[in-house]
C-alpha cells in the first residue's frame, strides 16, 4: 500500500492555463503531468500508488465555493482520491465554512501562506487552525521557500510558535498540522532546530535534491529527519505534478537506512490513521 499525501490537480478546462501560469512564475520548476484528474490517475497507476490526497489552494478570497465543489465531486466519485478542502484567510465566516467541510466528510484543509501573502502566525490563520482542531480537521500547509515568491511566509520558527500557541489555547496535544516539504524547503537547519521532535506531522515532498529542481535536502537528511522526528509522524508525499510520483516511490523504497517498519509507517500507515 502506498498513499501519496501531497498532490495537486485542476479542473480540465483551466488545467493547462494554470500550469503555464505557475511555471512562468517559477521558470526553473518542471512539471510531470498535465495537472488534470485523469493525468494523476495515470501517474498513480504507473507509480504503483494506491491513493492520493489532493490539496487545493485558495489563492484569493471568494474561491471557497468553486474550489470545494470540485473537491467534493472528487470525494463523491473516487475511492482512491481524497481531496482536502481549501480556504483563504480573508474568507468571511471561516467557522461556518469549516463546519461545512466537516459535515461533508472532508478530512482536512490545505493552506498556502505564500499564495495568500499571509504569515502562518497571522491571527486569521490562528483562527482557522484552532477551529480545525475543534472540528477534527487536519491542516496541511506549505512550508519554507516557494520558488515563485521572495518572502517566506511559513518559516520553522513561526511554525513552531503556531504549534505551541494552538496547543496551549486548545489543550490538544496530538499532531493536528502537517508541515509540507520536510518541514520547509531550503530551511532544513531551522526545521531541525524548531520542528523536529514536536507534535506535528511532516511530509517528504520536495525532499530529494536529485529528483527535482526545487528539492532542497539529501537522502541522508531525510533519514536524519525521520530518526529525530519519529517515523510515526512522517508522511510519504510527492507534490505531483511538480515532482514525478514514480521516481519518488522508487527513491523512497530503496533508501537503505530506514527499516521496513519505518517505511511502512511513512508509505501508508500514518496516512491511514489520519484518513480513517
Image (cartoon, helix red, strand yellow):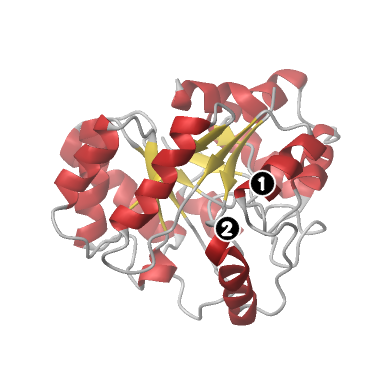
Q: Disc count in the image?
A: 2
Residue drawn at 78 percent across, 47 percent down: 219
What residue did someone put label 1 on?
A: 38
Give the image quarter of residue 249.
Answer: top right
**Residues at discs 2 and 1 in contact (Cβ within 8 Å):** yes
Q: Residues within 10 Å of mark 1 (few under 14, many from 20)?
A: few
Q: Position of residue 197 (x, y in %)?
A: 49, 37
Q: Position of residue 161 (x, y in %)?
A: 31, 53
Q: Is residue 207 left or right of residue 11?
A: right
Give the image quarter of residue 198.
Answer: top left
Q: Quadrant of the N terminus?
A: top right
Residue drawn at 40 percent across, 59 percent down: 157
Q: Is residue 195 left or right of residue 172?
A: right
Is residue 38 positioned above or below 190 on the image? above
Is residue 16 positioned above or below 47 on the image? below
- Spatial CA distance of label 2 from label 1 is 9 Å
Residue drawn at 82 percent across, 46 percent down: 247
Query: Mark 2 or 1 closer to N-term?
Result: 2
Is residue 22 positioned above or below 236 on the image? below
Q: Is residue 7 left or right of residue 244?
A: left
Residue nearest the observer in this picture, 217 or 33 = 33
What residue did someone put label 2 on?
A: 12
Q: Position of residue 119 (x, y in %)?
A: 33, 67
Q: Residues within 10 Å of mark 2 (few under 14, many from 20)?
A: few
- Assign a secondary structure to mark 1: helix
- Assign a secondary structure to mark 2: helix
Q: Quadrant of the C terminus?
A: top left
Give the image quarter of residue 169.
Answer: top left
Q: Position of residue 264 (x, y in %)?
A: 69, 22
Residue nearest the observer in this picture, 64 or 13 = 13
Residue 104 seen in render: yes
Amino acid at each position: 500500500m502506498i498513499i501519496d499525501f501531497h498532490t495537486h490537480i485542476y479542473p480540465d478546462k483551466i488545467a493547462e492555463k494554470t500550469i503555464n501560469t505557475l511555471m512562468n512564475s517559477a521558470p526553473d520548476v518542471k512539471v510531470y503531468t498535465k495537472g488534470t484528474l485523469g493525468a494523476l490517475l495515470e501517474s498513480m497507476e504507473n507509480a504503483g500508488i494506491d491513493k492520493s490526497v489532493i490539496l487545493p489552494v485558495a489563492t484569493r478570497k471568494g474561491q471557497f465555493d468553486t474550489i470545494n465543489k470540485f473537491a467534493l465531486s472528487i470525494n463523491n466519485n473516487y475511492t482512491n482520491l481524497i481531496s482536502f478542502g481549501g480556504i483563504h484567510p480573508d474568507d468571511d465566516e471561516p467557522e461556518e465554512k469549516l463546519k461545512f467541510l466537516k459535515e461533508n466528510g472532508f478530512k482536512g484543509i490545505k493552506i498556502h501562506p505564500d499564495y495568500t501573502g499571509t504569515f502562518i502566525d497571522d491571527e486569521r490563520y490562528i483562527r482557522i487552525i484552532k477551529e480545525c482542531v475543534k472540528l477534527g480537521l487536519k491542516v496541511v500547509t506549505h512550508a519554507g521557500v516557494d520558488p515563485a515568491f521572495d518572502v517566506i511566509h511559513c518559516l520553522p520558527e513561526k511554525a513552531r510558535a503556531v504549534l505551541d500557541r494552538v496547543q496551549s489555547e486548545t489543550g490538544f496535544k496530538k499532531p493536528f498540522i502537517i508541515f509540507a516539504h520536510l518541514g520547509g524547503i531550503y530551511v532544513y537547519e531551522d526545521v531541525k532546530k524548531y520542528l523536529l521532535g514536536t507534535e506535528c506531522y511532516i511530509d517528504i515532498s520536495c525532499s530529494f535534491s536529485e529528483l527535482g529542481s526545487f528539492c532542497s535536502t539529501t537522502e541522508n537528511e531525510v533519514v536524519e529527519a525521520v530518526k529525530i522526528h519519529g517515523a510515526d509522524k512522517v508522511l510519504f508525499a510527492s507534490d505531483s505534478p511538480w515532482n514525478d510520483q514514480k521516481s519518488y516511490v522508487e527513491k523512497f523504497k530503496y533508501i537503505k537506512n530506514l527499516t521496513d517498519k519505518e517505511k511502512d509507517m511513512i508509505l501508508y500507515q500514518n496516512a491511514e490513521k489520519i484518513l480513517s
